[in-house]
Amino acid sequence: MSPSLVANGGVSSPAPVSGRVSSVYSEVQSSRIDHELPLPSVLKKPFKLVDGPASSAAGNPEEIAKLFPNVFGQPSSQLVECDSSAELPNQKLKIGVVLSGGQAPGGHNVISGIFDYLQDRAKGSTMYGFRGGPAGIMKCKYVELTPEYVYPYRNQGGFDMICSGRDKIETPEQFKQAQETAVKLDLDGLVVIGGDDSNTNACLLAENFKGLNLKTRVIGCPKTIDGDLKCKEVPTSFGFDTACKIYSEMIGNVMIDARSTGKYYHFVRLMGRAASHITLECALQTHPNITIIGEEVAAKKQTLKNVTDYIVNIILKRADFGYNYGVILIPEGLIDFIPEVQELIAELNEILAHDVVDEDGLWKKKLTSQSLQLFDLLPEAIQEQLMLERDPHGNVQVAKIETEKMLIQMVEADLAKRKQEGSYHGQFQGKSHFFGYEGRCGLPTNFDANYCYALGYAAGALLHGGKTGLISSVNNLAAPVEEWTVGGTALTSLMDVERRHGKFKPVIKKAMVELEAAPFKKFASLRNEWAIKNRYISPGPIQFFGPASNSLSHTLILELGLEV
Amino acid sequence: MSPSLVANGGVSSPAPVSGRVSSVYSEVQSSRIDHELPLPSVLKKPFKLVDGPASSAAGNPEEIAKLFPNVFGQPSSQLVECDSSAELPNQKLKIGVVLSGGQAPGGHNVISGIFDYLQDRAKGSTMYGFRGGPAGIMKCKYVELTPEYVYPYRNQGGFDMICSGRDKIETPEQFKQAQETAVKLDLDGLVVIGGDDSNTNACLLAENFKGLNLKTRVIGCPKTIDGDLKCKEVPTSFGFDTACKIYSEMIGNVMIDARSTGKYYHFVRLMGRAASHITLECALQTHPNITIIGEEVAAKKQTLKNVTDYIVNIILKRADFGYNYGVILIPEGLIDFIPEVQELIAELNEILAHDVVDEDGLWKKKLTSQSLQLFDLLPEAIQEQLMLERDPHGNVQVAKIETEKMLIQMVEADLAKRKQEGSYHGQFQGKSHFFGYEGRCGLPTNFDANYCYALGYAAGALLHGGKTGLISSVNNLAAPVEEWTVGGTALTSLMDVERRHGKFKPVIKKAMVELEAAPFKKFASLRNEWAIKNRYISPGPIQFFGPASNSLSHTLILELGLEV
């Protein structure tokens, strides 16, 4: 019998744990299923929704207003304690949920939170899980979520309860399919668990349904390990905490290895294509010798040579101190941040599409001199990769470039030259790592488990309260869970527009690493010390009990204005 | 004030924790320093050493006897409780310790165990740590180990307290250097913490010192994450438990990701060149779809094509069930287990040394037809790697081949062909991983922490008791730590000889995966089910408290004749 379900008043007689379909559990997985999830105290008592003032948009409010005539300007809504006469009346609801985009630890707890909300506060409700992401909505492919079905996924990593997908609901035809599903299932509400794009999509659905007077309301939840969906009202996306702690465990281990062995430079590429939050957070947790932050590279308009020089210079200094080892963190998206690389790739795409690439290299004359210089700087293997591996549209596949290996080769070449010149006497051996898939489906940390459960519970409350076009928002996260505040924020208030093909498109702007914000400034103030002196920290494996088991990410702590 | 030091009666007033040189600690690292280490109860009371019968050798005892005239045939020795009148007299000792070879979690606890033994039972003793491995002995490069120096490394990963090295003491000159150091430091004993080679070396040192009537005794300790140094008396090498749990955490995460995403085959190469114990243990912990065990490949004389076919066939079957994803474990040393690959490489080395490699490929005619067939089967990138990347002796660098990527390319090519033929309709996308450096320096599990501490404490006792040429042996590991038995085993009893350059060389034979032993048989009985049905287990991060925090490796449990 599950203490948590009982504590939440959900299921009077939970079914025995059957395990995920054709799966078995480790001891730690099992223990996590029965781990009781704390709720913010406002969610444990009678509560009501209290609206704030009308909202605006993150940019171009007049355009956003035009794009969202039915939901623009909605106030944020806060859950506040009330006496039982004022609380939301019990009402049977039909609620759908969908996971959208890449995995992030905690997704199952968002679903559990919605589910438990309905069990607790809207008894007799029905919940559907759309399978395989937004395509499941369009194709009306779903599973009815029962206590037996949901329970084995509590506090478990992965998205495999209903799986995810990367489809978007974009065309009029696709919106029509979504409407049909909403009507067919008689949905009162839909929760979209996803990143910036998916939440934009959620808001478009909310607008669309409301415009058609459908009763189906739509609430978003902030998901992405990349950490680039956040704002004042949504302090962090779920999954970031767990993923960064998993990567930092590995980085910390590699650091101790580097110091013990004394002869390797470990180049660690970390997932996170658009923004470098993961790399920054891991740096704050582990104190590597060198960390490249994409946003800084872009802001300073650095070239690939600038980046290599920066790395080489630190390696030279370290060699003077007798250190021929180190750890270097690189964001997955580094190349995308370097303007000259973008330019080279654009030129290559053009040449490869229209010209013959001769063996003697005469084709190279078609490159601008800047691009030619860059091309010649690149290691041969990368040159070949740029020339040979192309996507179905004939374009160079930037994503396939193993940046960490490229940098090792470039640094190696540079150091060999300096050795010949007599200005370097150290030894250099690079080892490459990519930490990505290891972090997306780990068992959620206590923070992510609790945060997700509250996000889901809040989403249930917002739908119950008749809200649409909001994103579930849980705040005051540095306090104990009991004191967390819970509500919803107008999705349109997070939006700006981008002009594409002559039309305005609404977007929730990705939250990039801000060079003036506390996390980067903290890092920048320490990195020179970390470069030479070895201040390595090994965070160790994520703990569910005891020390550090309830820690927050450094990024979140610093963004909340607190000291790490 | 450290509870553990006080509990062991070691240091009456420990210095404040200063941290490792220029390092800082995470919360989990800090908590581990103060974590109290339990001792087997025999080590908490007065004890004496009781010898067993004379020993022999693992093979060719008459040759081993000739190679080790002074230490061959020594009995094993067991620590047994006694009344205080019979215990070893307090005696000031001078003891050196050295770490040899690759890192393994727990090395610092072996040192702590020796150190605490001396503090507890031989008050006034001095302990030296040789720096940078056996070279530190030869160069007499050492640090005196004090409570302040040792304490911050308790339960910490890495070998950075005194660092390690891969040198061997082999030549008469090198033995002379070691003798000089032993005499100069007036050493009563030396503890060599290392793998099979290092323990062979320890025994040669013991023999050498005893033959010269030096008082310096030598005791070995079984270290290697590879798990290939073990026998009846030495049930496991330390570090294996932690490393496998770290890799299994990552594999489990990748499995949940594979199932959630539904579109990737993850090829995971695992450290362990000589033996496949790590791969087997990780398979037992996580239940991958496909696991290649090098020893089986060798025993069945499989070709690379056999291995690829095996993988492809399972992928085809899975596609029939609608599964276009999976997880495949590959031992680092796979290629070394395939006879035809060894043959090809030998032929290539020969050709590259003596012939011109022409662009038109006429040189290929010099390959035997079997080798030519294999060469043509290899992906182009691997062919190039074989031709271009050579070590300083001009030999092909097998170790640099990324086997997981090679297999992905071969499987990809095979599936593309089948797709064209119409016999495969699935989708295949491979993702490659190498888990190695992440596991060698993690925070030791409770098992490794306790096991190492007992190994070190035992080594101290053996030296105190006048023993030499033994390896520290701790047994009854499935029982609570209190009930572990402690002693030493004659290193010569682990030895056989190999004939090299016409001479017999003593070797401790690497313990390979035995196809008739319980761990492999358990795996073999389940792998067909794992192949098709998804029985993934995600062990989650290593826990220091609560569930699974005191679990043993599956390999050890099964080898002890117990059920997992």
Image (spheres, coloured by chain):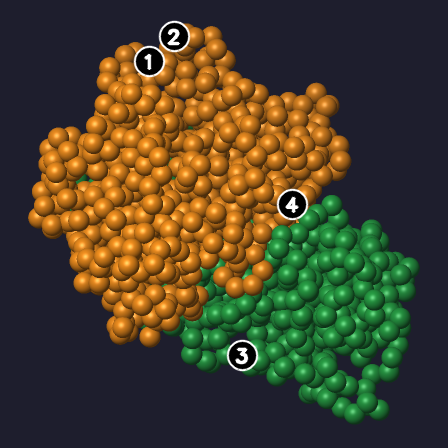
Chain colours: A green, B orange
Q: Which mark is residue B351?
A: 1
* Image quarter in which the C terminus of chain B is found: top right
Depicted A264 relative to depicted A108: above or below: above
Q: As shown in the figure, which amino acid type bears the numbered disc 3?
A: Ala
Tag 1, which secondary structure?
Answer: helix
- Residue at image location 81% in from the left, 89% down from the top: A84
Q: For residue A81, say whether it is visible.
A: yes
Q: Dot 1 falls on which chain?
A: B
Q: Is residue B156 left or right of residue A425?
A: right
Classify 10 Å Cα crowding around label 1: few (below 14), some (14-19), many (20 and above). Answer: some
Is there CB contact under 8 Å for labels 4 and 3?
Answer: no
Relative depth, front residue between B140 and A556:
B140
Is there CB contact under 8 Å for labels 2 and 1?
Answer: yes
Tag 4, which secondary structure?
Answer: loop
Q: Dot 3 falls on which chain?
A: A
Q: Are marks 4 and 3 on the same chain?
A: no
Q: Dot 2 falls on which chain?
A: B
- Residue at image location 60% in from the left, 74% down from the top: A234
Residue at the disc numbered 3: A478
- Residue at image location 24% in from the left, 33% down from the top: B71
Residue at the disc numbered 2: B366
Residue at the disc numbered 4: B536
Q: Position of residue A473 (x, y in %)?
A: 65, 75
Q: Is residue A329 left or right of residue A216?
A: left
* Count of marks, rendered view: 4
* Sequence-earlier tag: 2 or 1: 1
